[in-house]
Image (tube, coloured by chain):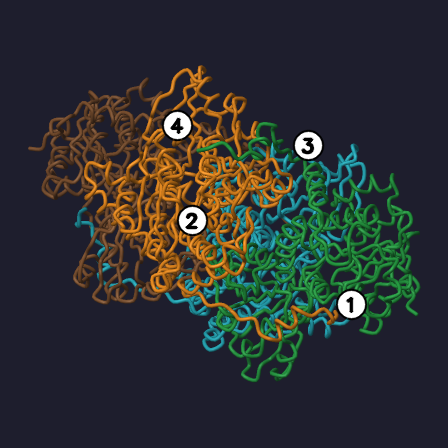
Chain colours: A cyan, B brown, C orange, D green
Amino acid sequence: MTAPISERLDDPESAREEGRRKMDWAREHMPILASLREDFTEGQPFADEVIGMAMHVEAKTAVLAELLAEGGAEVAITGCNPLSTHDDVSAALDAHGNVTSYAERGVDDDAYYAAMEAVIEHEPTITVDDGMDLIAAIHEDYPELIDTIVGGCEETTTGVHRLRAMDDDGALEYPVFAVNDTPMKRLFDNVHGTGESALASIAMTTNLSYAGKTVVVGGYGDCGRGVAKKAAGQNARVIVTEVDARRALEAHMEGYEVMPMHEAAKEGDVFVTTTGNRDVITAEDFEVMQDGVLLANAGHFDVEIDLVALEEMAAEVTEPREGIEAYVMPDGRELNVLAEGRLVNLATPVALGHPVEVMDQSFGVQAVCVRELVESGEAYDAGVHDVPDALDREVAEIKLDAEGVAFDDLSEAQAEYMGSWQHGT
Amino acid sequence: MTAPISERLDDPESAREEGRRKMDWAREHMPILASLREDFTEGQPFADEVIGMAMHVEAKTAVLAELLAEGGAEVAITGCNPLSTHDDVSAALDAHGNVTSYAERGVDDDAYYAAMEAVIEHEPTITVDDGMDLIAAIHEDYPELIDTIVGGCEETTTGVHRLRAMDDDGALEYPVFAVNDTPMKRLFDNVHGTGESALASIAMTTNLSYAGKTVVVGGYGDCGRGVAKKAAGQNARVIVTEVDARRALEAHMEGYEVMPMHEAAKEGDVFVTTTGNRDVITAEDFEVMQDGVLLANAGHFDVEIDLVALEEMAAEVTEPREGIEAYVMPDGRELNVLAEGRLVNLATPVALGHPVEVMDQSFGVQAVCVRELVESGEAYDAGVHDVPDALDREVAEIKLDAEGVAFDDLSEAQAEYMGSWQHGT
Amino acid sequence: MTAPISERLDDPESAREEGRRKMDWAREHMPILASLREDFTEGQPFADEVIGMAMHVEAKTAVLAELLAEGGAEVAITGCNPLSTHDDVSAALDAHGNVTSYAERGVDDDAYYAAMEAVIEHEPTITVDDGMDLIAAIHEDYPELIDTIVGGCEETTTGVHRLRAMDDDGALEYPVFAVNDTPMKRLFDNVHGTGESALASIAMTTNLSYAGKTVVVGGYGDCGRGVAKKAAGQNARVIVTEVDARRALEAHMEGYEVMPMHEAAKEGDVFVTTTGNRDVITAEDFEVMQDGVLLANAGHFDVEIDLVALEEMAAEVTEPREGIEAYVMPDGRELNVLAEGRLVNLATPVALGHPVEVMDQSFGVQAVCVRELVESGEAYDAGVHDVPDALDREVAEIKLDAEGVAFDDLSEAQAEYMGSWQHGT
Amino acid sequence: MTAPISERLDDPESAREEGRRKMDWAREHMPILASLREDFTEGQPFADEVIGMAMHVEAKTAVLAELLAEGGAEVAITGCNPLSTHDDVSAALDAHGNVTSYAERGVDDDAYYAAMEAVIEHEPTITVDDGMDLIAAIHEDYPELIDTIVGGCEETTTGVHRLRAMDDDGALEYPVFAVNDTPMKRLFDNVHGTGESALASIAMTTNLSYAGKTVVVGGYGDCGRGVAKKAAGQNARVIVTEVDARRALEAHMEGYEVMPMHEAAKEGDVFVTTTGNRDVITAEDFEVMQDGVLLANAGHFDVEIDLVALEEMAAEVTEPREGIEAYVMPDGRELNVLAEGRLVNLATPVALGHPVEVMDQSFGVQAVCVRELVESGEAYDAGVHDVPDALDREVAEIKLDAEGVAFDDLSEAQAEYMGSWQHGT
């Protein structure tokens, strides 16, 4: 049986202190959660709930977990990626009266799933996932809990994708909000959050720059367009690869070059995959890459770059810098893989994950979705649900208010005009 | 009874020749319509149809009308804005065996609606609108025709908006494709087409530049973000106004300043409204504007800038350049209104409307939608319909093919991966 | 003997009125000249001077000529390019008591040079050139005037280039300010002025757009980087060609692709030459271009695109639109040349030349340079001179003041710090 | 007497190994130095020289020092900033037969200057500085060495600034190349190097993002415009402050807002100073800043933000994250200062200094300048010298060649054209 993190650390006290310091920094830059905290502390909306969470356990997520706990919930949490946990934050969170944290960095697969089971043993009434591992485990191994689960929330593109497939198979047995698909998440977290943090993580891991480099972006979804835009904004030449005609055309019309990966492989200096799919860069691409290229993944799973093939092709693997493995090809070319092909904005030694402010937006949606499940969960059938637009807008308004940004009101005459169809040219 | 344009011109022959030359230039830069022309000429899909059109009658639209005619249809067309018609193009189109054109530039309201009636007298089986005037006229004055109408297509944001209102009122009695809402239209025509052409039209009407100017963009829908992006791309400082919190936040996160119009009014050098709504700039805004500002509208109707109020406030109105009216305020400030507040990329003396290539995309969608109505119109209920995604993608693929842009195929393993949900971290 | 324009027009009165209206619009958007006008009208610094000018005679230049006349000078002016003169502006200028204008649009070479001689017959004491034709003519045919000439000003890159060559040959016999080389001219007029106006002129002549297009920019001097930046800002993919390694590297580091013209020729949709040199695009490039490309020149002379070779290669030349000649190759490809390869922001039918505001800056420098020649001309030896930095800064300060832009003062402590070298790490 | 670093470390062997690994990564991404290494190893141009260096002792500089040693020089090196030294790199460098390194991180002022003296005791014949501390120390305390010194090189804006002041005072007694002022250094290192690395360092120290933030850039020199451009490229709103009218105007024309710092202080979320001057942000600015702002410096010395005043104003100073000090104002606002106001791209815990590639360019110029001093040092008088253009171009060509970027050659006809002045319109 997996024990909470505090029982596993040598010096939980100092870990807690350091974790607390990290959380405090994040809290201060999360105005949306701050605004909700006032409401939740007062109203205690989650008083009767057990919330199970499987997310990246670092400072920002911890602020969300703590917010839910402060709103009255019993919270049990573990990681959603063995490399993304900060043990000190995990410990600080575990120190909270209403929270138990099982997350520990660098655990093996067995320990990873055991921690997930430990969370499930709390018998959650609500689940909050980043990658749907918790939902999958409950459906596979704890179906008996499903009856008492009000619903869940899913944070990522990849998780929602898998949930929809599960839903299409008729296998999803409780309602889940596709938090990832809300405008507030998609437009900001993916575009700005992934875009900026992936590139900064690569830059600060390699000490290389983007000006004059050719950056190949695999995929032109929200993450891909964020990476492309921010790379171009740092004076890189950007090449986009896609499997979807319309997205390919969008990238083309934006001014980027679009070509198949096998062509792009010959041109690129830096490669960033963002598709949520596997095999974006494969053996035939490695064959034609230039010496010294950087290969990084910004998608949820480490399957976008085919490292199995790369390892087979390589004569040797060295570690030229922390967080970088150089696959030395028989012909002497070195292909540098960052963070073992895992999420590059989470898994390099310097990585801090998504920026605080974008997580504030994304977690603001999570928090109001959890509130919605508590208030009206019975109104939702089993299956994937779009987040109600009113909730998403509520978060946008809180944010603008916090930033001091004012905007116009629709006048009555305008509302009437938008609703009418009789006026002519 | 309104006569076709050819019967109203002094020298229809030379008009036709000039119109033909304009159409030929457009045709050569519309690869999507060229690709469809091959299919339609061969297959004659519209052989039994009468297509009524109310659109901007200039070279590009003419290429669409001609394409439908070449596909076998009898086409009757008139303008959708009294100022946007090119008489020579109208004449060239009218010269086509299958086309009758009633469009004439600068006609008054009575003549405008009489021309629309002349189109309706052809008893169209399909309607193609830009602003839904034709649909409105049929519903109001020719309800007896509705039975034999297969369906319609609507080109603009504004038209779709009004159609949805009409549909909500239960008043729309045949199916209409919201062409405006397709990704292929929305993402390219609005963003790139309106963005580039509105700004170029302003620049070439005023001889002024954007560098260092403050450009206030009213509205952050697709048109607004196009104008904002392209103005920033020409080194303007951009301020955005909005009535929607989430769009306001999007603009803010893009790096633009967001503020109420009344605040922006004090800062702006150039104002471009793009909302599709009325009263975006009003009397209280005129009061605080700087001397010499430029006021332009890129939305469908001339109601976004409150010219009625402006005229009342002004001591005098002069015409400092063709296409510009200077409203001289009692305090001496001059507010320069372009193109009488009508669509600035259509109605200034130098304006050419949307760029050819973006209209190629948009009209490509129109053409396949008309084909869809002919082939499967009965499958659609009365009301506004989204364009089926497959049609939109078909157009994207034609375009990429024409541009010589290759992209990746989804492998079987990838398709399988995207459809599965069992694999873990 | 060439007569002033007023004597050559059929209806000089109405021409004058229209020209005056154009000049008034420009005047209102030229705050720097407005500020200098107050000083010059008061002080009459040019009371004893005859100023000969050979410049593009359109509204903005006319405001400069008028300003000099209002400062007391007798001004004689003609065009510096047969296609850039606006006859109405020429007439309006000629109507001024202190100004005689000989500029007429579309004259042949003989008439062009005869007009220049007519200006010289006024026996200027100061010359103001755009392309050094006046200086060249004086040195070649009127050397006897040189003794009484205080000095000159030259506006363009090309003119300064030729003057420096002349100076190196020891052939320049009076002092000339290289106005073109001042920061105030170079950084704004070339980058922003040429960049924006060249692209807007192309767009409004062709009705084509930049999004998704490949724009090839010949040369990465100030004009070239303006065109490149603004084209990228309208979502074009930009390719730069250069003959200078450092500029090539600059373009590369900015994120643009750099390649030889012969490679770029295969990729480009739109070509804009900006080098000031000849033969930038030649026969071997025409051979490999795509059907439908646009060829435009933004450099001073029409020698950058080798039209002689192109004419020889073409099977036929047609005019698909006003301002465009299509060279039809034997293999059917059409290469579209804008404005006969002349300055595309001046010589297309819709072209208005440089934007008003950037000419205000550039002409502000001209005006203070003329003032400097009058006040201290004897202090300058024969030869090309950089504009004294203080004059250039004076114009910058006037402009910021007019725009209402405030900035910081250097404190005494800061000035002391910048001047010291003893403080350490 | 200061001992070399190897004698001061507990475990010099493992430090050396780690330092070597860092140097190897840098070496592989410095193609210009690689190209020069071939020449220098072969030709041994520095065989009789002692080169004294005071620079940031981290991997990239180490590659330069090693290159000079491989070219035959005896090299003695120390740091130019107590916080920028990497002890492991210092140790790896010290292990080279021709190099002695005295640099150690975090030493106090006395030890810092003692290390500089230790370098001088080697009796350098050439000095290479980053901030002119070595030149200053020699002039003040070791004037007897000046006779045998061939010359020096200075890397930074600040150093060159101080050297020119010294030269103006007649106090500089040997020739020094202003490496900082070369196009190859200025255009790339400052703009791209400082711009990208300063922003990435801030992002990775704070976990904050730029989208939607207001970034205030103090100074619009090359560093400032790099920071501004890259911040805007990451969707920040950018405000620029300046003391120079022309630079202020440049920033304004680029589309940035320009205002005095005291106004900007109220608006900014992030402040980056880049002026090379003191007191850019002062007490009156701290008074009006928002809670939670980030204050960072990208100029050479830690005098741009007045920390003395800030400390006096603060009620308390805490460390919310490593590398950040929060000055808590009496009214509760927290102003977060990064890296104690030292160079933010060098002195935060995650900072890696300038990107490798831009240092390759900058150090390429250093290397050819040292070669020039050895070959022709006697040709240069005492004083500050611009780097000969041919040397700078040589480095540009090596770089383009290494990047595989081809460009055009000037044809004979073109060269002739550029050199002539007789051809006309």
Label 3 neighbour load within 10 Å: few <14, some 14-19, many 20+: some
- Closer to viewer: mark 3 or mark 2: 2
Image quadrant in which you'd find residue B104: top left
Task: Report the disc number at residue B31.
Answer: 4
- Tell me how far mark 1 sits from mark 2, CA to CA: 63 Å
Q: Position of residue A180 (x, y in %)?
A: 50, 53
Amino acid type for the residue under numbered disc 2: Thr
Identify the residue under disc 1: D82
Label 2 neighbour load within 10 Å: few <14, some 14-19, many 20+: many
Identify the residue under disc 2: C125
Location of the N terminus of chain B by quadrant is: top left
- Tell me how far mark 4 sits from mark 2, CA to CA: 59 Å
Q: Chain of mark 2?
A: C
The reply to whether callout 1 and callout 3 are in contact (CB within 8 Å) is: no
Task: Report the disc number at residue C241.
Answer: none
Badge 1 element? loop
* Furthest-left residue in this view: B1
Badge 2 element? loop
In terms of depth relative to the viewer, which is nearer, D143 or D4?
D143
Share a chain, discs 4 and 2?
Answer: no
Amino acid type for the residue under numbered disc 3: Val
Residue D348 seen by the camera: no
Badge 3 element? helix
Image: C330 above or below C421: above
Identify the residue under disc 3: A288
In terms of depth relative to the viewer, which is nearer, C297 or A357?
C297
- Closer to viewer: mark 1 or mark 3: 1
Amino acid type for the residue under numbered disc 1: Pro
- Tell me how far mark 1 sits from mark 3, CA to CA: 44 Å
- Tell me how far mark 4 sits from mark 1, CA to CA: 64 Å
Q: Chain of mark 4?
A: B
Image quadrant in which you'd find residue B239: bottom left
